[in-house]
Structure formats: C-alpha cells, structure tokens
Amino acid sequence: MHDQIRNEESAVLLSEIASDAGAIMLENGAEVYRVEDTIERIIRSKKNTKDVDVYSTTNVIILSFSYKNEVHTNVRRVKARSNNLYYIDKVNSFSRSFCRGEMSLENALRELKNIKESPDKPLIFKIVGAGIAAAAYSLLLKGGINEMLISFIVGSLSYYFAHFLEENSLGYFVVNYLYGVMVSLVTILALNFIGGIESSKVIISSMMAFVPGIMLTNSMRDLMSGDSTSGLTGAVIAILISTALAMGVGTPITIMKLWS
C-alpha cells in the first residue's frame, strides 16, 4: 500500500500527479467541482499531507498542500477544451485506484501519461456519429425519410469541416460560425438539387453536434454550487457559441434572399 509520501521529491510528484489528472479532466469537459474534488481526493489519499486547497476555473488549476511544514504549489493552464467522456472516465478510474493505494507515485505518473497519449476514437466514428445524431433529431422534428438522409449527409460533412478548422487552431467562435455557414450552404444546395425537403428541420438537426448543451448545463451547475467565476464564464462562452452558429446559418440564407 502507498498511503504516505516519504520525502520532498515524493511531494513534488504528488503535486504533478494531481495537476495532471485535473488538467486532463478539465480539457475534456469535466465540471469544475468534479475537477476540484478529484484533485483533492488524490492529495488527501496520502495521510501525511495537510492544508489541502484546490481552486479551478474553466482554464486554470491552482493547488497547494503542506508536507513537513513545506508548502507545495502547482499551477496548470488549460488552453483548449472539448467534450470527451472517454478521457474523463479514464481519469476517474485512475483516481479511484490511486486513492486506494494500488500504485506508486512513479507508476501513477506513467499511467497518466499513457492516458494522455492514448488514441481517441477514430475520426470516422465521430463523423458517422454526428450524422446519425443529426438524422435521429430530424425524426424527432417529425421529418420524413428525405430530411433524415439529408440531415445525415449535412451533419457528417459539416462535422468533418469543423474538425479540419479545429486542427488548424482557429478560435472557437470562428469554427462555430463557419460550421453554421457550412450547414446552411449544404442544405441550400440539397434543396435546390433535390427539392421537397423542409430545410429548417435539416438545419436544426445538423447543428445538434455543436449546440453547447453540456457547457450550458455545467455552467448552471457551477453557478448553483457557488463557483460563480466558472459558471459565468461557461454561460458566456455557451451564448457566444450559440450566437456564432446562428450567425453562420443566417449568413448564406440572408445573402440568397438579397440576391434573389
């Protein structure tokens, strides 16, 4: 069992483990309270640590604890955020094993490195998933078979386009704006070539992959738990993403109306 740290070097390793685990969770869309709770549990799992404090916002983690009257502090900046429950689940499983004392500090650090470097789901799965989500939502909107098929195509193509933009490090507002433009343009093209489809249902369905529902829910949870900074930041970002999507969808439609 590894329930204590034995020297200053171990204390430094513990701070790195806790901050790494929190950073992985935060950059993959975990709630702020969950990030803080996980970090605190990891540090408190060592019985000879004292005065544990953890503060997190949507992109910064600050932690400190004392060991033999020496204060150890770690700051971690998280620059990019996404929603990926795969990595959150991996870190949750890791933290439970670590808190039970099932691994040494060195092994824990290696395990976190393996989690960070583990491959995500293949891109084709995400593209098909976005298409299926769009097609399924069109059925909820009482669309027909034509709307379902077009929604699948539009959702898949638009998701791939947005992934390409994200790989080129464009800001989230630009990515969501151009995603909305892509959804609108492909839907207009489908309407012109195929006809007989309700474009509004196709557009709404195809946007579901990027609607910031999880972010808005998490921000409300943070606000209600007293994390006002993270809650307000998340709510503002969710509003900006929704605005970008709406502007992107509306731009081609407005141009087409003015042109005609």
Image: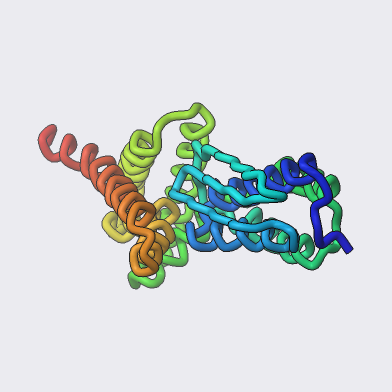
Q: Is residue 77 left or right of residue 114?
A: left
Q: Residue at x 33, y 57 (%)?
A: 228
Q: Considering only vertical position in the picture, is 100 above or below 189?
A: below
Q: Is residue 164 left or right of residue 5?
A: left
Q: Residue at x 36, y 64 (%)?
A: 226
In which quadrant will I find the C terminus? top left
Report x, y in % for residue 132.
52, 60
Report x, y in % for residue 239.
28, 51
Q: Nearer the viewer, residue 204 or 42?
A: 42
- The outermost residue toward the front is 69
- The outermost residue toward the top is 168
Report x, y in % for residue 3.
81, 62
Q: Considering only vertical position in the picture, is 149 above or below 19?
A: below
Can residue 147 be seen by looking at this rendering? no
In which quadrant will I find the N terminus? bottom right
Q: Considering only vertical position in the picture, is 219 above or below 155?
A: below
> Quarter of the image holding residue 257?
top left
Q: Nearer the viewer, residue 227 or 70?
A: 70
The count of marks equals 0
Q: Residue at x 53, y 31 (%)?
A: 167
